[in-house]
Amino acid sequence: MAKKRLVLNFPPHLIDQPITYQLITKYQLKVNILRARITPKEWGRLVIEVSGTKKNLDAALQFVAEVGVDAKPLAQDVLWHEDRCIECTACTSICPTGALSVSRPDMRVSFRHEKCIACELCVPVCAYGAVEITF
Amino acid sequence: MAKTIQEINEKIKSGRAVVFTAEEIIEVAKSKGVKKAAAEVDVVTTGTFAPMCSSGAYFNVGHTKPRIKLGGGRVTLNDVPVYTGLAAVDLFLGVTALPDDDPRNRIHPGKFLYGGGHVIEDLVAGKDVKLFASAYGTDCYPRRKLETWIRLEDMNQTVLFNMRNAYQNYGVAVNLSDRIIYTYMGVLQPTMRNATYCSAGQLSPLLNDPLYVTIGMGSRIFLGGGVGYVVGSGTQHNPGVPRNDRGVPRAGAGTLAVTGDLKQMSARWLRGASFTGYGSTLAIGIGIPIPVLNEEILRYTTVTDAEIVAPIIDYSDSYPKGIPGNLGEVSYAQLKSGSITVKGKKVPTAGLSSYTRAREVASILKGWIQGGEFLLTEPVTTLPSADSGITFKPLTERPINNSSASR
């Protein structure tokens, strides 16, 4: 089994296509929708976690690329600027997945990409602009 | 065995001073005993790094040709307005100042991305900032407009001057309401889904000298990455609050006014901060050395997070309305464990003051002293302490009703 967190950007003309349905039925993927934004006539955005066999996952990625959906790994779109972080720990109590966490008792803050679901809760909480979401 | 600051300075100069941070001294005193530790240790260094809003800087930008009287005129640095009610080319910039076109909270919650604190960070980082000025013109200062790039090194005096820093202890913020609130204590989730605190606890300067025996006017300190001095007690200095049996205040108490030359400071220790829905400010690194003159002073520096308590305050109602009282007390050891219990509910905690940076400040200062480059000063006068009778008064409003009595 392979697992990936992806950001899918849908061009406006694909808004009526049931692409997630295809991922589930045609490619047998388990799809967990983390975030979705769909507005008529605008680019749509879907943040998903998909798991399935490596073969199916690769085929599914090829399928979405062919229909014109831009798929990028989530990790690329969430940036943690370590140099801007002062390790105050303000973000750590709000992060729902523990991607931003503090080690105790030394109180060091760290960010683990693979746990991040891009919920953006940390963005207004950080006074130093240390977390940046670029999609 | 009592020591004097002069004796300690002789040891510092010869590179023999024994220095520990306020975190390290806890273990040192535990293993050696207070008496032996007090005899052997010369200095304990403290540190803190946190947002401190009552801060600012004054500048003398030099005279133009022909001259312009910025005093009484209007000046902005990177669009952030500065105070000009001074002589011709002296300016004061406060860290919470915002550009006129900042949306503030018109679109709630505002982001406050750039303010006075960020200008100071940029200047200290060596960046060019835009100076726009308009003045009314006089016979001796005829010019009315000025637009120029300016850098810290271009200016004459560039002085960080903070009227309230290094708060001795602080409250813990929670939100009892059912809506999210945006405060200077961070974003507080409804129905106590988080709690925030803001103190370096056992590393914090004034918590290691709780009755202000050694820290006073003229104390040489680490300020913003450079060397600074304590000016005196800061605004809202409130030494008369309840204390524990070791003299440690159980709530916000003493404060410091501090100053230092910005030209030798660094952007790592002066960081602009943007509090969503609240405003902009500056996070500042401060470290204060405590000379171990006797056993009593050493004992004060061995204070631990478990012994320092802070009151829990509801920022949805009692804080904004100024209603006294609290929801109980918790220790910094509990706060740093990641959760506290308030009214029977487990609440996750988060800091606003960086403990790792506080530790770094204390250890940099320790290095300066060990290296013989930083000497201690005898305070010119001490700060008003618990017995001073000083209180922190609220404002009692008196209606004006068109009365001309006060003019």
Image (spheres, rainbow, N blue to C red):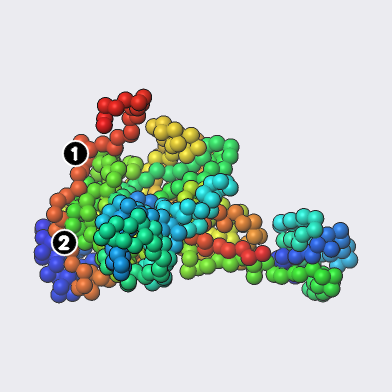
Q: In which quarter of the image is the C terminus of chain B?
A: top left
Can the viewer see residue B302 in this picture?
Answer: no
**In front of the other: B400 or B255:** B400
Compare residues B253 and B340 and report the one nearer the observer: B253
Q: Is residue B391 visible?
A: yes
Pinpoint the chain carrying mark 1.
B
How much space separates mark 1 and mark 2, taking CA atoms? 24 Å
Residue at 24% x, 48% y is B233
Quadrant of the frame with the N terminus of chain B: bottom left
Inspect the image, locate mark 1, and give the three-letter code of the amino acid beneath it. Asp
Residue that carries the numbered disc 2 in the rendered image: B377
Q: Where is residue A79 in the image (x, y as percent from the top left)?
A: 58, 67
Whether residue A94 sits left or right of residue B73 in the image: it is right
The three-letter code of the residue at mark 2 reads Thr
Query: What residue sits 29% from the left and 57% below the top?
Result: B138
Residue depicted at x 84% and y 63%: A13
Structural crowding at the residue carrying mark 1, measured as other residues with C-alpha within 10 Å and reported as few (<14), some (14–19) or many (≥20): few
Residue A100: percent from left, percent from top: 55, 60
- Name the residue carrying label 1: B387
Given residues A120 and B84, the one toward you in this image is: B84
Mark closest to the chain's N terminus, 1 or 2: 2
Q: How many marks?
A: 2
Q: Is mark 1 on a helix, strand or loop?
A: loop
